[in-house]
Image (cartoon, rainbow, N blue to C red):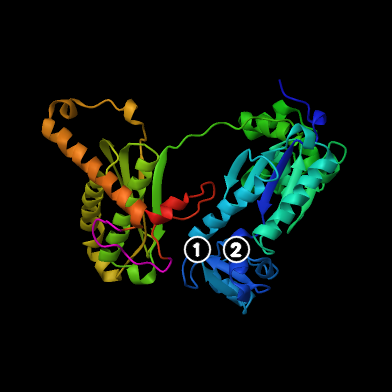
Amino acid sequence: MLESPEMNSCKWLFFDLNSYFASVEQQERPELRGRPVAVVPMDTDYTCAIAASYEAKAYGIKTGTRIKEAKMMCPDLVTVLARHDKYVEYHDRILSEVIKHTPINKVCSVDELSSRLPPNKRTADKARAVALRLKAGLRQNLGEHIRCSIGIAPNAYLAKVATDMEKPDGLVILSPDTMQERLFALKLTDLCGINVGMEARLRRGGITSVEQFWHLSPKHARRIWGSVEGERFWYRLRGYEIPDQETKTTMIGHSRVLDTELRNADAAYQVVRRLTIKAATRLRRKEFFAAGFVFAIRFQSGQRWARDVRLSPAQDNFTFLKALEGLWTQMADEVMASRAYRQTRDRPFKVSISLHGLCRRQDITPDLFDQSSESYQALTHKNEALSQVMDNLNSKYGAETLRLGVSPKTRAGYVGTKIAFSRVPDQAEFFE
């Protein structure tokens, strides 16, 4: 049975760091404070901003803005190469600070988390006091430039919506007596879960405002959505608690846009080898085996090549490197050896690999060859043992103390590990 939102109006706190990557850079580097800053994945005008400081946002620069255009919008723009290891380091420190003030229910991303407030903190005054102490703790223990917006509401969804109502450094409480007024002032696309495509679908259904959506029946919302998610969204908007659907890890992968000096066949191959080893190391650390390997490459012309190969479940470096070698050779024969490739002087631009078909050791059913061949079993055992030795030495003495082949040097200082929208890498990944 769904719990009425009126029973606990301040049950959830949502925490959203403001311009997180750019704020960390400004905290770390005093010369960047008060200046328009764009954090970039590569040192070129032909990439996009992955974060922008509020000073840059004042010029209209935002995530996804091309740097060449951004510099036309703001000639004084400072571009800073992303340091994902530093952002994860701050992320861990921030979690340690948050837990001093309120429980952490879910870490949603590197800059967002939700907290189910304790029963004795669910009045507006007490929830506000928690939020203010948390903000003060950030300033004191992380720095003046690490700011956050906090939303408090009957459920985690509305608390997240509230964080976007006041930025930067906001604090918004959505209680049952003010909730409708605050929500009705928003555009449909201000609500998490309604993108441009869904807004168009709602408009076709005659819904052009949050207020109109509010007055639908849940079954009507379901019909417009085309799935049960419409009904779930309707209840979340009204403050009911709808459990998140559990997700599980289905693949492990890494990708890399190549630095300009690495856009040749030999260097690109060394980069993708390194990505493969990093992914296999993560696989072992999480105690998975993988039964599939995908290699993909995109060229400067926009041409893309990708293939998938099925394997006996494995977790050692050597199995996946052998799979990569075969796919790379196939790609080179089909693409790089072609007349069109040579005539256009095309170059590799981005490489990626992924391991899929994940399973645990106890779930593996060996095939007949595995069961009957002692030599195969011995080789598999040796490869797993060697890979584990590499992991142990690199963990103890530093990344790449022991490595297979040449390790490419990138401007960021590491290959493959970066923060994704919904995944925060472990600190260990930067040392694998």
Which residue is rendered at x = 57% and y = 31% of the image?
Answer: 245
Q: Is residue 103 left or right of residue 292?
A: right
Q: Is residue 197 left or right of residue 333?
A: right
Residue lying furthest front in this view?
396
Quadrant housing residue 179: top right
Which residue is rendered at x = 65% and y = 69% of the image?
Answer: 56
Which residue is rendered at x = 35% and y = 41% of the image?
Answer: 284
Give 322 or 188, whichever is nearer the viewer.
322
Residue lying furthest bottom in this view?
75
Give the residues in magenta. 401-412
Q: Name the residue under label 2.
A: 24
Element type at mark 1:
loop
**For marks 2 and 1 on the same chain, the one whose residue lies earlier in the sequence:** 2
Give 391 or 319, whichever is nearer the viewer.
391
Label 2 amino acid?
Answer: Val
State yes or no: discs 2 and 1 in contact (Cβ < 8 Å). Answer: yes
Q: In this view, does 414 lie to the left or right of 140?
A: left
Q: Mark 1 points at which residue?
A: 83
